[in-house]
Amino acid sequence: MIKVQALDSFEHSGRRARGDCFEVSEKVAAALVRKGLVRVVGGEFVKGPQRAGGAPSSASPAAQASPQTTAKPSVAGAKKRGRKKKTTLEASS
């Protein structure tokens, strides 16, 4: 069990006021810390997943992602591609 202190009031197995100290399991403590509701004041608390012992994995490492490309702006004065506007002569015929 891990002893935590409430940073703000919230409800967890009853009302917890700001500054209250109480004990919870590691799993619950991790969830409350992630939400920013408590801080750990006592007990062993391990953040994040544990690394497995033994030989490193034989699986290939993840490939690097390609850099994201963006469209280049048109050169000043270049015509935009798109639908041509009708002229007044074409509209009357």
Image: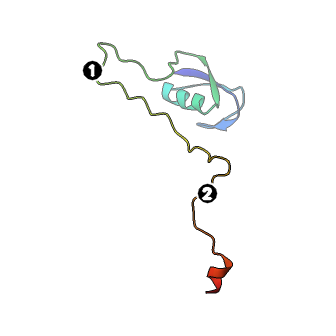
Q: Residue furthest front?
A: 89
The spot of residue 42 in percent (x, y) is: 59, 16
Of tags 1 and 2, the one toward the viewer is 2
Q: Residues within 10 Å of mark 1 (few under 14, many from 20)?
A: few
Q: Earlier in the sequence, mark 1 or mark 2?
A: 1
**Image quadrant where one finds the C terminus:** bottom right
Q: Residue furthest top?
A: 54
User: Does the residue at mark 1 contact the one at mark 2 (Cβ under 8 Å)?
Assistant: no
Left or right of 20 on screen, residue 81: left
Q: Which amino acid type corresponds to the residue marked 1 in the rendered image?
A: Ser
Q: Residues within 10 Å of mark 2 (few under 14, many from 20)?
A: few
Q: Which residue is mark 1?
A: 58
| Residue at image location 53% in from the left, 27% down from the top | 30
Residue 73 or residue 54, whichever sits in front:
73
The vertical placement of 29 against 54, above or below, is below
Q: Position of residue 57 (x, y in %)?
A: 30, 20
Q: Position of residue 91 (x, y in %)?
A: 64, 82
Residue drawn at (62%, 56%) of the image: 79
Mark 1 and mark 2: Cα distance apart in space: 52 Å
At x 61%, y 23%, the residue is 4
Q: How is the image coloured?
A: rainbow
| Secondary structure of the residue carrying numbered label 2 | loop
Q: Which residue is mark 2?
A: 80
Q: Nearer the viewer, residue 53 or 83?
A: 83
